[in-house]
Image (spheres, helix red, strand yellow):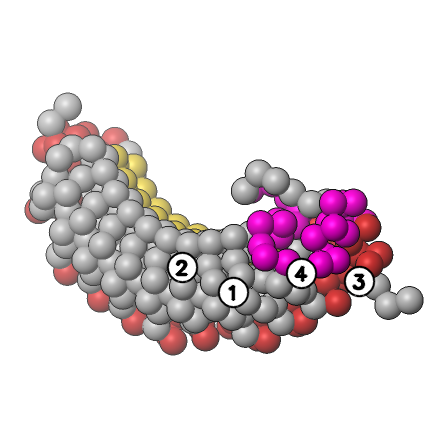
């Protein structure tokens, strides 16, 4: 079905529109007339930018922009007050507009596979954000605003340029999944061990030689895990010093018993 026909159909029957894989390098002007649209999929096209007209879709709840050539997001995105889910992975983004922090109802944000180095401080106001994916970017320090996102349950920062994790990580009290594999982290803060809700902690493929003795407090990890998204502790793929390497061969219980004060 042609793009114009799809838009005509949406105008008359529903609030969902998928223009995925349509070979678009610009968005059709008719799209911005669909003011009742709630779900819009523009993924897997060749879009380099979005017009300010995006703001006209004031009822938008889910926006999928994955797999395009976007170098920026328009500041007008901050006017999408009902937006709950934004997928903008696999683009060419180098930064995120400050206005994204005005999307107060945002719950899920994926910015994976871009060239982002940081996030604007305004995003500290995203009190409802539960899932943030910043994997495969160029982040050297976890952005300060992330530590203010107290509702985060899922935080994915794999394959960046991280060397440390700040002590403020303890502020993410609801965090269940933390993935930081494939970085250059050489030490973990003991405050990480106070995140009692953690069910998956992936620190594989970093530069860890030692761990905080308090790690045994992470009782919900349950086991040593192998597959990337399995629940548990992923740590064996690090240059860990002896005797930690040998102790880990006995499993998580043996590791925790080794760490516990006698």
Labels 2 and 1: the sequence-earlier one: 2
Label 2 and label 1: CA atoms lie apart by: 10 Å
**Residue at horizontal 47%, vertical 63%?**
184
- Give the quadrant of the C terminus: bottom right
Q: Which residue is mark 1?
A: 185
Q: Residue 242: within the magenta? A: yes
| Mark 2 or mark 3: whose residue is earlier in sequence | 2
| Residue that carries the numbered disc 4 in the rendered image | 241
Residue shown at 10% from the left, 43% from the top: 25
Q: CA distance from mark 1 to mark 3?
A: 20 Å
- Tag on residue 160? 2
Residue 50, image x, y percentages: 16, 54
Answer whether labels 1 and 4 touch (C-beta < 8 Å): no
Residue 112 screen position, x and y as percent: 36, 52
Query: What kind of secondary structure does the magenta stretch mostly adopt?
Result: loop
**Which is closer to the viewer, label 3 or label 4?**
4
Image location of residue 142, percent across then percent down: 45, 69
Cα separation, mark 1 vs mark 4, equals 15 Å
Label 2 vs label 3: CA separation?
Answer: 29 Å
Give whichever of discs 1 and 4 has the lower sequence position: 1
Please state the extent of the stretch shown in magenta in the rendering: 229-253
Q: Residues within 10 Å of mark 2 (few under 14, many from 20)?
A: many
Q: Which quadrant of the view contains residue 239?
A: bottom right
Decide which of tag 3 and tag 4 comes sooner along the chain: 4
Relative side of 258 to 143, left or right? right
Dot 4 falls on a residue whose secondary structure is loop
Looking at the picture, tell me which residue is in the foreground, 22 or 248.
Answer: 248
Q: Is residue 9 left or right of residue 250?
A: left
Q: For mark 3, what is the residue?
A: 259
Verify CB contact (< 8 Å) between mark 1 and mark 3.
Answer: no
């Amino acid at each position: 079905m042609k793009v114009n026909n799809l838009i005509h159909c949406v105008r008359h029957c529903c609030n969902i529109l998928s223009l995925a894989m349509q070979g678009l390098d610009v968005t059709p002007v008719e799209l911005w007339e669909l003011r009742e649209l709630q779900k819009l999929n523009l993924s897997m096209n060749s879009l380099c930018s979005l017009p300010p007209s995006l703001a006209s879709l004031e009822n938008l709840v889910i926006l999928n922009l994955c797999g395009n050539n976007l170098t920026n997001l328009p500041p007008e995105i901050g006017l999408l007050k009902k937006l709950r889910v934004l997928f903008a992975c696999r683009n060419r983004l180098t930064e995120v507009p400050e206005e994204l922090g005005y999307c107060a109802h945002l719950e899920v944000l994926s910015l994976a596979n871009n060239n982002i180095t940081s996030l604007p401080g305004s995003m500290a106001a995203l009190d409802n954000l539960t899932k943030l994916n910043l994997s495969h970017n160029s982040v050297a320090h976890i952005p300060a605003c992330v530590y203010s996102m107290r509702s985060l349950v899922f935080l994915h920062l794999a394959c960046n340029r991280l060397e440390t994790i700040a002590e403020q990580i303890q502020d993410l009290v609801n965090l269940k999944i933390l993935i930081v594999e494939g970085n250059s982290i050489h030490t973990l803060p003991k405050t990480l061990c106070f995140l009692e809700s953690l069910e998956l902690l992936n620190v594989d493929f970093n530069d860890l030689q030692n761990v905080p003795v308090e790690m045994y407090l992470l009782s919900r990890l349950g086991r040593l895990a192998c597959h990337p998204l399995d629940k548990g502790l992923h740590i064996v793929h690090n240059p860990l010093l002896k005797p930690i390497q040998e102790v880990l061969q006995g499993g998580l219980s043996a590791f925790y018993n080794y760490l516990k004060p006698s």
